[in-house]
Image: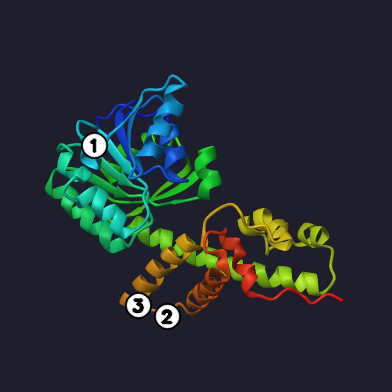
Amino acid sequence: MRGANRQVGGMSEKQTVAFLGLGVMGAPMAGHLARAGHAVTVYNRTTSKAEAWVERHRAEGLSVSMAATPAEAAAGKAMVLSCVGNDDDLAEVVLGPEGALAAMAPGTLFVDHTTVSPGLARRIAQAAEAGGVAALDAPVSGGQAGAESGRLSVMCGGSESAMAAAEPVIAAYAARITHVGPAGAGQAAKAVNQICIAGTLAGLSEAVRFADAAGLDMAKVLAAISGGAAQSWQMENRWDTMAAGEFDFGFAIDWMRKDLAIALGEAKAQDLSLPVTALVDQFYAQVQAMGGARQDTSALIRHLPERKRP
């Protein structure tokens, strides 16, 4: 659901916000916030990226600025959002000595879009609550393309009131925003998402290799099966590129393995076995060893040898 034209939780739709992290996801997300009319202050560990982002968006006439630390970015803001790399990165920019929470006033809102462990999400929520700050763990799905087009899917963990306050702002870059439960639930839902993608890409990889070995016309096979029960986003968007050996786009294998490690770690803590996910993670390790660490997750197919041709 989206709440683009609502005013909720006493917070106006146009706000002063901070965005921490300007990677391939964060940079376009922060840009959508600025174009939606919010005054955006950004922070990025690599200062040159923040400088370039500000220069580019000021050229559009937008209200943007940069800060030297997460705390400086967060000071005086109604809402702080983040999208960084991993658990350690997030803990530093939120809970560290110059982290955002140290500068946030009671009654403000923190929203994290990084994919991290549910345990860290709950820890941040507890620290935020102690300071009178509301918090949401809100990982996203849709990849770089979704961030750039403003069509991300967001799964949120936290209180209903925090969700209501955040939704009109998040709507600047999201097509679907779903409240899935209390603190940590958003991250658990993201683990579910990555488990599904891993299994889908494993099956798709084998299907592409099988179709090639059988001498089938790839385009005709796609047309024949994509309208039936086998259809998926991965099939629609990655069948042709997997068949062609093109992997220079999308979500990197390094990040997928980070996410799968979270899923496998949570499963172990619950005494739950995820044999397919564990196997696909091993396949991704093989592709990393082949030099594919920064290739798109669809490069999973590389662990399967191509058909020998005469």
Provide residue 29's location: percent of width, then percent of height.
44, 39
Q: Amino acid at mark 2?
A: Ser
Quarter location, residue 197: bottom right
- Mark earlier in primary sequence (3, 1): 1
Residue 58 visible (yes or no):
yes
Residue type pointed to by label 1? Ala
Q: Read off the residue under disc 1.
A: 74
Task: Point out the residue furthest to the left here.
Answer: 130
Q: Residues within 10 Å of mark 2 (few under 14, many from 20)?
A: few
Q: Which quarter of the figure has residue 79?
A: top left
Tell me if residue 45 comes above or below residue 305 in the rendering. above
- Residue 207 lies, in percent from the top left, at 71, 70
Q: Residue 206: image x %, image y %? A: 68, 73
Q: How far apart are labels 2 and 1 at the CA level?
A: 41 Å
Give percent across and percent down for residue 18: 30, 35
Read off the residue under disc 3: 268
- Helix, strand, or loop for circle 3? helix
Locate the N terminus by quadrant: top left
Drawn side of residue 36 relative to residue 247, left or right: left
Mark 3 and mark 2 in contact? Answer it, CB < 8 Å: no
Please determine whether, in this image, residue 265 is positioned above or below residue 91.
Answer: below
Which color scheme did the rendering employ for the protein? rainbow
Q: Point out the tag, 2 or 1, that comes first from the N-terminus.
A: 1
Could you say which disc has been placed on residue 273 in the image? 2
